[in-house]
Amino acid sequence: MRMLIIILAVIILLIFILQSFTIMPISKTEEQKHSLVRKYKDFEIRFYPSATIASINSNAKTYRDLSGPGFQKLAGYIFGGNEANKKITMSFVMPSSYTKDNLPKPNDPNVQIKNTADEYVAVIRFSGYASDEDLKFYSEKLQNLLKENGITSLGNYRFLGYNPPFQFIGRRNEIIVAVDWKEK
C-alpha cells in the first residue's frame, strides 16, 4: 500500500512539473490586441481592433461536435497545411505581423482567412475545460448581466479558448458578444 502511495505521489508530481513547463511557453503566445474600456464586477467591456483570423464554417450543432474536427482543420493550416508549407505558430487569431494578403493560402478549402471588424465586446471569463453546458451557462449569465446594466448585445455569443488541450492547470476561457457601446 505504501509503495502505491509513493508511485501515485511521483506521478502527480511529474504531471505538475510537466504542466508548469507547458504554461510558460503558452504565456508568451501573442493574443489578439484589445483595450479594456470598462470593468464591471463580473464582466468587462473591451475594444478589439480589426484582426486577421483563420476560420471554418461547420454544420455542427454543439461545441463538442465542432471542437475536435474544427481544431484539426485549423491546426492543420497553422502547422504547415498551406500552399507555402509555412508553419504559423499561433492559434486561430493570426499573429499581428500577418495580414489577409501575406498569409499563405490554406490547402483545406474549408479554412477561410478573413479580417474581423473593429468592435466593442462584453466579456465574461471562466476556467477549466469548456463544455456545451458551460457555454450555455456563461452566455446566459453574460446576457443577464448586460440587461441589468442596460447594455445591448449585438449578434451571437462566441467562445474564446486560450489553451491547448494538454494544459490541465490555469485554463482560460471567455464568452464574448458584440455590444452597442458609446464612449462615455
Image (spheres, rainbow, N blue to C red):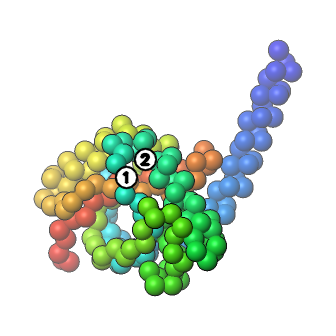
In terms of sequence position, does the residue under pointer 1 or pointer 2 come before the other? Answer: 1
Q: Name the residue: 30% across, 76% down.
A: 117
Q: Is residue 11 positioned above or below 143 on the image?
A: above
Instruction: Name which residue type carries label 2.
Output: Leu
Residue 114 appears at what percent x and percent y?
39, 74
Q: Name the residue: 68% across, 49% down.
A: 19
* Image quarter (top left, top right, bottom left or bottom right) of the C terminus: bottom left
Q: Name the residue: 63% across, 68% down.
A: 80
Please name whichever residue, 125 or 84, is drawn nearer the observer in this view of the structure. Answer: 84
Instruction: Name which residue type carries label 1.
Output: Ser
* Image quarter (top left, top right, bottom left or bottom right) of the N terminus: top right
* Mark 1 element type: loop
CA distance separating discs 1 and 2: 7 Å
Query: To which residue does mark 1 refer?
Result: 58
Residue 29 appears in the rendering: no
Q: Are marks 1 and 2 in contact (CB under 8 Å)?
A: yes
Q: Name the residue: 19% across, 71% down.
A: 181
| Side of 128 where 123 appears, left or right | left
Please name whichever residue, 29 or 44, is drawn nearer the observer in this view of the structure. Answer: 29
Are there few (<14), some (14-19), or many (20+) residues within 10 Å of tag 1?
A: few
Please name whichever residue, 165 or 9, is drawn nearer the observer in this view of the structure. Answer: 165
Residue 36 appears at what percent x and percent y?
35, 71
Query: To which residue does mark 2 refer?
Result: 66
Residue 52 appears at what percent x and percent y?
43, 75
Residue 29 appears at what percent x and percent y?
58, 68
